[in-house]
Image (cartoon, rainbow, N blue to C red):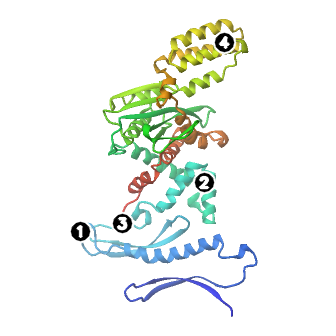
Amino acid sequence: MEKGIRIIAQCYEIETGKIIDESIIRDDPLSKAETLHGLGYRHVEQIDFLQKIQDLKIKHQIVLNSVKTCPTCGGKTSKRGLFSSEFHAALTDHKVKLQRTSCRCGWISEPSIKGIFGSSMHPDLLEKQALQGGKESYEKSSRSLDAESASKRSINSHSQVYKSIKLCGELLESVRGGPEYGSGQLPANDLYATIDGGHIKARGDNRSFEAMVATVYRPENIQYVNRNHNELTSKSSVASAKDDQQEAIKLLFKRACIAQGMTKETTVTCLADGADNCWSIAKSIKDDCQEVVCILDWFHISMKFQNISIPEEYSELYEKIKWHLWHGNSVTALAKLGELKELISDHKTLLKLSKLETYISNNQEGLVDYGARKREGLAYTSNVAEMTVNTLINDRQKGKQKMLWSREGAHNVLQIRSSIFSGTWKNDWKKLEDRIYKKAA
């Protein structure tokens, strides 16, 4: 007995079961699969199913959007012809026939999907493009999205992915920097903030610009993993690549602090590498909390020491300098550093020691007893900030990517990546949808 598989899509009356319209999606004889390649339906065939099923549903669904009563005066509308409009779903593209209507009062209906809903792209597709473009290059994103659809789609072009990133990035900054963002959180007595920067290659002149990133979290959200690693169960990360005297990053940083529970009674401890732009961001919230405590993070201090090669006979003295800094004794550390410089003859080493001396001298206000803080379980290093820079900037905009960026382009990507890294993308995306799309009349 020969068998076949027939797939039929139907539009029918629910009450009577009467079939209004139907489409045979697929009708094939059933045969033995000689290889796994022939078992079931292939990817391109599955997409074809979706295409035909969507076409049938949209054909009948869009009729329900035809306005018969004028939303302006309440009068009866008249038909004014059929118009063809594009609609781009997550995996398929469609041509939709729209019945345009008008009223004697002057009102006339929208002749396109974009006019009715605010965009011709389904929210699922826009979100996919934003997430994909935030993860890899626009060219790679285009190819990845086309691969999912099993066809080359103009709506997935690299220029369209760029436009989607721009749209979502700009709106995300507005949402995450808005006055209501993060409100309603439980008040926090203490917050930690790590602030750092990363350089991105600039387009045009082979130079670079700095993007600033910050992560804010509650001390109780630090989860121990092992002696070398901790994990944050909740955090708010923000970033900016704008050249705007830090206006954007300061606003985003303030909202991130509020999202973690900052009030006028909160002490915010900020850890950074000692750069003025980091401290400027940290101190920008001084009127919004009880106190801002600025600490030069131990990670950057230790890195300064690792980059200098000292002769073996002076290594003990060198370690004593580091030991005194670990215990917050900057005056003693600087004195011993001066002694060490008197003993070193190599010009390059002396130059590095002088830079270390300047670094410690310029950041004495941020030096604390790191050993005591460690024993008390308090933050003393900005390893979280280093992870943030790697996740938000380096993984997408540096290293093997070999890309050149405009500040605007980098900034928009950073808004998406920081939302994802913070774990707030789902809620942030809902707010974007509300701004981009509208309800039909």
- Is 275 or 202 nearer to us in this picture? 275
The residue at which mark 4 appears reads as: 350
Q: Distance between the residues labelled 2 and 3?
A: 31 Å
Instruction: Identify the amino acid type marked 3.
Output: Ala
Near mark 3 (Cα within 10 A), the count class, few <14, some 14-19 or many ≥20, is few
Q: In this view, does 134 lie above or below 38?
A: above
Near mark 1 (Cα within 10 A), the count class, few <14, some 14-19 or many ≥20, is few
User: Which is more N-terminal, label 4 or label 2?
Assistant: 2
Residue depicted at x 40% and y 63%: 117
Residue depicted at x 47% and y 32%: 377
The residue at which mark 3 appears reads as: 440
Of tags 3 and 4, which is closer to the observer? 4
Secondary structure under tag 1 reads: loop
Asked if marks 4 and 1 touch (Cβ < 8 Å), the reply is no
- The answer to whether 136 appears left or right of 189 in the picture is right
Instruction: Identify the amino acid type marked 1.
Output: Cys
Of tags 4 and 1, which is closer to the observer? 4
The residue at which mark 2 appears reads as: 141
Residue depicted at x 56% and y 51%: 133
Q: Distance between the residues labelled 1 and 2?
A: 47 Å
Near mark 4 (Cα within 10 A), the count class, few <14, some 14-19 or many ≥20, is some
User: Which is more N-terminal, label 3 or label 1?
Assistant: 1
Q: Distance between the residues labelled 2 and 4?
A: 49 Å
Quadrant assignment, res 300: top right
User: Which is more N-terminal, label 2 or label 1?
Assistant: 1
Q: How far apart are marks 3 and 4 (CA)?
A: 72 Å
Near mark 2 (Cα within 10 A), the count class, few <14, some 14-19 or many ≥20, is many
Q: Distance between the residues labelled 4 and 1?
A: 84 Å
Q: Residue furthest front?
A: 375
**Residue 73, labelled with which disc?**
1
Q: Is residue 274 visible?
A: no
Instruction: Identify the amino acid type marked 2.
Output: Ser
